[in-house]
Image: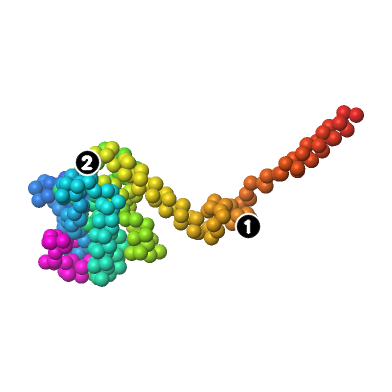
Amino acid sequence: MAEHLASIFGTEKDRVNCPFYFKIGACRHGDRCSRLHNRPTISPTLLLANMYQRPDMITPGVDAQGQPIEARKIQEHFEDFYEDIYEELSKFGEIESLNVCDNLADHMIGNVYVHFKEEDHAAAALKALSGRFYSGRPIISDFSPVTDFREATCRQYEEDTCARGGYCNFMHVKMIGRELRKKLFGRRQTRFWGRRSRSRSASPSNNHRRDRDTDRERGNDHERRDYRASGRRGGGSYRHESERRRHDGSRRGPPAREGSEERRARIEQWNREREEKGK
């Protein structure tokens, strides 16, 4: 019996403990949930509830003054916020991942998940955040049961197929740019489970154009990175890669193409051989 209860703990089959709170650290029913929310007494992850406030919180693409706001400005606003949070909380210990939700539901909108390397670091940060404010709003922080963000993030969102849009009950993680990630985390591998930086619109179709622009920018950044890595201005990364493979013998490139003079000489040779065989 004990083994069975342990095997279903935190799953849909568990009729006692809330699976959403176990996986995401948040539940749309809140304190009215019919299942238990087992709040951890210690954890390497902190949840800063509803902390990030988008500049277009009221109407997507429109600021508080009713003026249209570009997606670039929204992303800049987010990255400024992200850098502020990272620099402040990294004072208490090494941060392995910092994830911000782009969901719309009340229990997830603007949630910030900070995963420290050590539980003691998270405890020190939680103590320091008590009674503090950010942008005139109190910081609501607590330990979170989430340690594996692969189980918490929406896989359909990563594949651009999530039909629930911003009201999905799994995390839609908002991503930072390549330059900021390199600045904050350096070369060490970080745990970013989301792929895209998307708008907060409840309808996924409203996000396609922005997603394509973001993906195109990332593709251009990737090409520029490969271009710089090639170490030459005359050729791209593909030429550099093929030359490297031919040099180390692991893979040969395509044969060099013959010139027009060489092709004519070869054709004349074939004709002479054919005439000799006919005699």
Q: Residue at x 71, y 44 (%)?
A: 259
Q: Depth check: 5 or 137 in front?
A: 137
Residue 247 image label: 1
Question: In terms of image quadrants, where is residue 192?
Answer: bottom left
Q: Where is residue 116 in the image (x, y as percent from the top left)?
A: 27, 64
The amino acid sitting under disc 2 is Ala
**What's the magenta region?**
122-143
Q: Quadrant of the C terminus?
A: top right
* Residue 93 in the image: above or below residue 79: below
Outermost residue on the right side: it is 279
Q: Depth check: 51 or 229 in front?
A: 229
Residue 202 image label: 2
Q: Earlier in the sequence, mark 2 or mark 1?
A: 2
The amino acid sitting under disc 1 is His
Separation of residues labelled 2 and 1 (CA atoms)? 52 Å
Q: Is mark 1 on a helix, strand or loop?
A: helix
Outermost residue on the left side: it is 32
Q: Where is residue 120 in the image (x, y as percent from the top left)?
A: 23, 69
Residue 16 image label: none
Instruction: Verify CB contact (< 8 Å) between mark 2 and mark 1.
Output: no
Label 1 neighbourhood size at 10 Å, few (<14), some (14-19), many (20+)? few
Circle count: 2
Q: Which colour scheme is used?
A: rainbow
Outermost residue on the top side: it is 278
Q: Which residue is drawn at 19% across and 47% down?
A: 67
